[in-house]
Every structure is written in C-alpha cells, then in structure tokens.
Image (tube, rainbow, N blue to C red):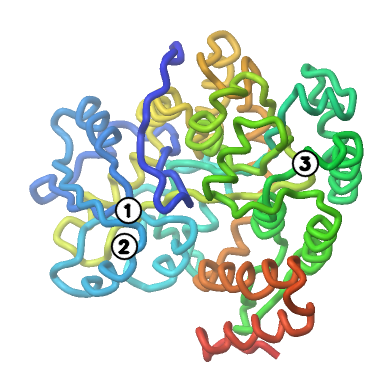
Amino acid sequence: MKLKKKLLAAATVALGVIALAACSSGNSSKQSSSGSSGKEIILWTFADMKPQIKEYEKLNPKGYKIKETVIPYADFQTKLDKVLGTDKAPDMIAMDAGFVSKYVDSGMLADLKDYGVEEATTKSFPYTLDIGKDSKGTQVAVSYQAAPGAVYYRASLLQQYLGIAPSDQTAAQAAFASWDKVQETAQTIHDKSGGKAYLFSSLQDMYMPAIGGRTEGWVDKDNKLQIDPTLLTSLDMMKTFVEKGLTKNTVGQNSDWFAGMSSNDIVSYSLPSWGLFYWLKDYSKDTAGDWRVIQGPQSYSWGGTWFGAVKGTEHEENAAKLAIYWSTDTEFQTWQAQANTDFVADQEVDKTVAADYAKNPVEGSPIGTQNPYSLFSEAAKNINGKIITKYDQNIQDLWINDVINPYSNGKTTKEKALATFKADVKSAYPDVTTD
C-alpha cells in the first residue's frame, strides 16, 4: 500500500476544538458490519462524515444505509438530550472527547459486548477503550482514533537560538524534557532574541498538556472535586511566563495564535496528533517543512471521537456493529489513516502505516519528511483514559476562565481564583463536594 501524495480533507473542525478526523482499526471482518432489520442506521454527528460513509459503502456495497444528520457542535448536546429516551432518538451518535463521558454514563447507550467488541478491540490503545466504558466497566462506546498530544517546533529557530541541528530531535526533546527545562529554554530564546521571539504563542500551549496529562480526574468516586497537583504547578509557571514575557500571550485558536505558525517569532506549539494536518498544515504556509515534532515534557491527550449505539432503537444492533466496524476494521482504518493522514486507535494499523510512511512521506507535510507515527504510538501508550469524567468539559472551561487566565495575567490572586472556581463548580454541579 502507498500513502496518497495529496492530503484529503476528511472532516470539519468543530468550533476549532476537535477535528472529526479518524477511525480506529482492527481485524473484524466485513461480516461484522452486516446486521438486522433493514440495514438502516440514523447517525447524528457534530461534523460531516460523508467521506467515511462513502468509503464504507465502497467497501460494503451490500452493507448498511447510513442516514447522516450533522448538527453544529454548539447545539449538538442540547438537541440530542431532547430526543434520547424517545422514539425520535438516532440509532448511533458520535461523541467528542469533551462530552463523551456524559453519554457513556447516561445509561442510554447499548452494551457492545454482545456485538463482539471485546474480540474486535484487542489491538486498540487501552486509553481509548477506558474512556468508552461506563462506571460499571461496560463498553458502550468505541473510538476510531487516538489523539496523543506533542510539541511541534521550528527547526531553524531552535537551531538559531539553541544551536540544535534540524535533524537532532533527541537534543530538541532534551530542551523540552520537563517543565523546568521548558522554562529554561523559553528564557534562553527570550534573551537571545532580545525579547522578539517566544517559545510559545499562548498559555494554551502549556495548559492543554497539563490538563490532558493529569493523573487524577476532576471528580473522584465520592463526587469530590479534585485539583491535580500538576495543575497548580503549571499555574505558577504560566504566571511566570506572562510576567517575564516568555509567551506572546495570544488567545489559543484565535487569528493571532494561528498567524504565529507562519511567522518567525513563535518557536513552538503544543498540538494534538490531528493538529498536524488540520491546523499546522493550513497555517504554516511560509514555514512549511521547517517544523519537527517531539513528545515534550509529558504525555497527554487532546480530543478524539467515540461512537455509540443508542439503547432500544429499532436499529440498535446495526448501529452497534457499525460503531465497532469503523473503530476496528483493518481495511477501513487503513484507508482512514492513509487518506486523511490520521493516527488511528488500532496499534497494528499505525505500525503498518508508519512503515509505509517511511518509504513514501506525505508531500507538503509541515514536518518535512519526519515520520511522526512512532512518536505518537509511544505517547498514546502513556495516556490515562480512566481520569475522564462526565464533568470534564465544563470544569475544564471553568479552570481556564476562572483560574488560569485571570491569575496568570495578574488580575486576581491565586486564592481568590481558586475560590471562584470552586464556587462556580458547585453552582454548576450541586452534587459535587468542593470543600
């Protein structure tokens, strides 16, 4: 198999947060995608999946008829909540990493065990499976992608300011090996550039790895709010970065943040695996080929998409089998990885695609001929999916807006910021203990 030389756009980025970009893979046969009662499936998703549907139909001409309804990300949960438990519910839903646990723990999704999920997902990255299990350990959702995070840096700028050769990713990783090293590197770049260059564009480049790499969930089994110690450490670091001018302090995913990808004043970005071709490729027009990717100070995840079958619908069985097929079928997942330059959840498919990538690098890659698959694979092995809770999306937003932004920018004290955060969490979730 050969990688396509031109990149194909597979799906839209919803609110600039997550690209519905990938499937995961396995060894299930096409028979696993054929089911009962009319072979029809009503799919609700927050991003257009026509490329995936078209490829599915190509591989399975006698398979399911998929009726897709695309709902804007901002409206998706509101509209879905109104129909779940009624006869108007879809058969299958796509769930973003930000709210997947809400539906996994809702009791509204079908148990996938009876449809062969355990046998089909033996080669999936464990964290993707953990996120799709409810509180009883039942697999009710599966992901067709893995989304490990990494640090992407400008090779020429790191050479200019640190003397690291563009081909020396080992030395580059040493400069980002810990958050202390990150701060040291940022200070060196600031000093040698006369304050005209920055290691990171925004605080987001620090808080997304910190949030995505936590060891503790936001809410424990006793419904008590937890603030991972690493979040407090990174909080102090971000304040230092702002005070010393070590970050340009743009707003993540705004126009200035993206513009830095094609300028000479931003050295690096923290991005998910899918960010390589859904953000960096689009915005690094004048710097294409000069980027490289390393793990950075910690393993973390950012985004992802899970599929589940809605319990009790007429076509529950069909939906369950399609969710498993998209997430485990080797042929389909190989297409997804190749056609969309994506990193999928099946580890064996990633290895195969990586070997082919080494022989046939994708033209126009922001990272030149560097092969990112091995790095992504190692990073994905270290992600902890068990920390994800149904509260994550809202609590994460409150942490950023109540604590990170005001405290780092000197608008409040840490004590007041934390008090506001706890009060807002309590207001949003009265059942959560915040003291």
- The span from disc 2 to disc 1 (Cα, nearest Å) is 6 Å
Could you tell which of marks 3 and 1 lies nearer the N-terminus?
1
The spot of residue 57 in percent (x, y) is 20, 31
Q: Mark 2 points at which residue?
A: 76
The answer to whether the residues at label 2 and label 3 have Cβ atoms under 8 Å apart is no
Q: Which class describes the residues within 10 Å of circle 1: few (<14), some (14-19), or many (20+)?
A: many
Q: Name the residue under label 3.
A: 199
Whether label 3 touches label 1, CB < 8 Å: no
Residue in view at x 24 percent, y 74 percent: 82
Residue 173 at what x, y percent from top left? 82, 33
Q: In the rendering, at what x and y percent does residue 243 appear?
A: 83, 60
Q: Which amino acid does label 2 sit on?
A: Phe
Q: Name the residue under label 1.
A: 46
Asked which quadrant contains residue 75, the reply is: bottom left
- Residue 118 appearing in the image: no
Q: Which of marks 2 and 3 is nearer the N terminus?
A: 2
Residue at figure coordinates x 77%, y 41% from the top left: 199
Quarter of image, res 81 = bottom left
In the image, is residue 341 above or below residue 114? above
